[in-house]
Structures are given as structure tokens and as C-alpha cells.
């Protein structure tokens, strides 16, 4: 089997969720031909499999060969975000920005990390910098909306999410973010509508079911609330969500 054929088999296995088979294929390719691109593929599948320590080793190996590989630096930053290490995530994204100051996704990702670290003012400034470079970035508008939500500026946040939807009608995230704003404002029908629109675009987004669960709970639709809360628990498996998972499980138990 040629290297190209092995890569094709690995990519197909990864797409089908067979992470073990995908890793084996990529490792076989690396034994014949080490490239940053294959280290990247291996790191990505290791992250999907939850093997973060192995992913770090793969990223490090890839960067040793190509220290300025932007794709590897993105994966490194995103991995640090997943591990809630905002400081190291920011450092990774800043390396990308040094290599390409107009890499707006790196600026927005840095803003997300800054927000996670509690530097809200810095996050807002970084996000606005990204929008100045690329006003058509839905990622930047969505992130700025999240910042405004944190600051209690619901109207400004809604405007950002609406801009994000206009820029990318296929992105479900701003619709789910709008749903939360409408829910907090007491407009439950609009909140349900936005949730349903978001989940039509991506039925695997746990947040949509969580919001719907609370909406139906407020409407005394107990079974609908339980169903949506249960679907949230089925989808949300990250360690960072343990507290909210425990809270939702307790709500379900109280409703049974």
C-alpha cells in the first residue's frame, strides 16, 4: 500500500470514528515519511480520542520539523483551550499572529482565551482588532457577542449574533446564543425558535438541548424538559462540563 493510500484509509477511518485504526495508519505513514501534515492528522485524531498527552507529543514532533506551521500552532492553541490552559493557548495564538498579523481566526481565538482567563477588556480589544482586519468574519462577530453577554450588554450581543448569522447562515452557534439572550429576556417563543433553527443545522450541539430543557421547564412541560436535558447529557461529555452535567442530572432526578 502506498503512502497516499494509507493516508486515505486513515482519513476514512477517522471520519467514521474509528480513531484507533486512524492512528495506526498515520503512525505507519510517519514510519516511512515524516511530515508536519501527517503529525497534524495524528494529533487531531488523538485529540478526538481524548489522548491529549499523545497529541502534545505529536504536535511537538511536527513543530520540530516545521516550527512555523500555522495549522499545528492552531491545533496546539485549541488543545490548550480544551485543557483550560488559557495562558499557553494565548501564547500559541500569538505565535500565529507574529507569523501573519492578518490571521483573524488566531486573533479571535486569542480573544476567547483572554476571556476564559478573565481578561475581558483585553478580549474585547483583540476581537475588535480582528473585526477591523476582516469585518466579514462571523467567528469574530460571534466571539464579540459572547463578550458582550458576559458584560451584560444583551442588545449589543444580539446585534453581533445577528451579524454573524447574516455572514454565515449555516453556522448554528449564533442562533443558539441568540436563544439564550431571548430566554433571559423572557421571550420564550423566540428562544425556542432560535434553538430549533440552530439544531436543524447541527443536531449534535449539546447547548441547544440544554437551553430548550430550561425553557420547557419554565413552561411546565416536564417531559419535554426531561427529554432535552437527557439529550444534553448524551452529547456533552467534556470534563470541563462536569458541574453543569451534575446540575442537569439532579434536575432530571427531581422531575422524575
Image (cartoon, helix red, strand yellow):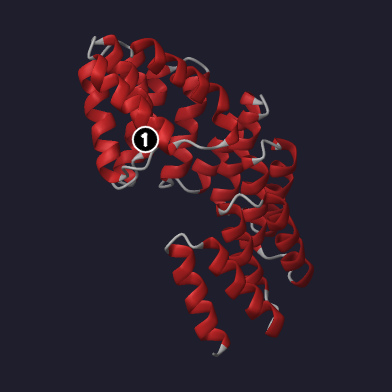
Question: Seen in the image, is 150 located left or right of residue 224?
Answer: right
Question: Seen in the image, is 186 located left or right of residue 248?
Answer: left
Instruction: Tell me if residue 190 comes above or below residue 14 in the rendering.
Output: above
At numbered mark 1, what does the secondary structure look like: helix, strand or loop?
helix
Which residue is farthest bottom?
Answer: 2
Instruction: Tell me if residue 93 comes above or below residue 73 in the rendering.
Output: above
Q: Position of residue 238 (x, y in %)?
A: 55, 37
- Position of the C terminus by quadrant: top left
- Position of the N terminus by quadrant: bottom right
Does any portion of residue 67 appear in the rendered image? no
Does any portion of residue 9 appear in the rendered image? yes
In terms of image quadrants, where is residue 198? top left
Q: Position of residue 53 (x, y in %)?
A: 73, 52
Question: Seen in the image, is 218 located left or right of residue 69?
Answer: left
Q: Position of residue 166 (x, y in %)?
A: 29, 42
* Residue wearing tag 1: 174
Q: How many marks?
A: 1
Amino acid at each position: 500500500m502506498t503512502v497516499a493510500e494509507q493516508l486515505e484509509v486513515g482519513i476514512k477511518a477517522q471520519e467514521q470514528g474509528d480513531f484507533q485504526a486512524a492512528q495506526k495508519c498515520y503512525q505507519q505513514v510517519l514510519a516511512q515519511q515524516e511530515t508536519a501534515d501527517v503529525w497534524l492528522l495524528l494529533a487531531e485524531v488523538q485529540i478526538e480520542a481524548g489522548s491529549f498527552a499523545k497529541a502534545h507529543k505529536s504536535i511537538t514532533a511536527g513543530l520540530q520539523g516545521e516550527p512555523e506551521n500555522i495549522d499545528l500552532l492552531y491545533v496546539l492553541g485549541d488543545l490548550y483551550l480544551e485543557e483550560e490552559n488559557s495562558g499557553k493557548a494565548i501564547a500559541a495564538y500569538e505565535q500565529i499572529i507574529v507569523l501573519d498579523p492578518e490571521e483573524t481566526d488566531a486573533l479571535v481565538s486569542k480573544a476567547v482565551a483572554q476571556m476564559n482567563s478573565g481578561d475581558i477588556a483585553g478580549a474585547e480589544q483583540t476581537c475588535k482588532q480582528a473585526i477591523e482586519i476582516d469585518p466579514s468574519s462571523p467567528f469574530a462577530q460571534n466571539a464579540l457577542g459572547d463578550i458582550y453577554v458576559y458584560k451584560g450588554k444583551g442588545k449589543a450581543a444580539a446585534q453581533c449574533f445577528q451579524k454573524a448569522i447574516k455572514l454565515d447562515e449555516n453556522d448554528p452557534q449564533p442562533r443558539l446564543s441568540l436563544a439564550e439572550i431571548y430566554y433571559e429576556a423572557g421571550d420564550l417563543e423566540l428562544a425556542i425558535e432560535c434553538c430549533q433553527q440552530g439544531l436543524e443545522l447541527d443536531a449534535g450541539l449539546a447547548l441547544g438541548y440544554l437551553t430548550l430543557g430550561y425553557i420547557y421547564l419554565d413552561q411546565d412541560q416536564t417531559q419535554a424538559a426531561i427529554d432535552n436535558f437527557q439529550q444534553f447529557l448524551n452529547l456533552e461529555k467534556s470534563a470541563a462540563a462536569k458541574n453543569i452535567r451534575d446540575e442537569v442530572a439532579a434536575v432530571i432526578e427531581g422531575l422524575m
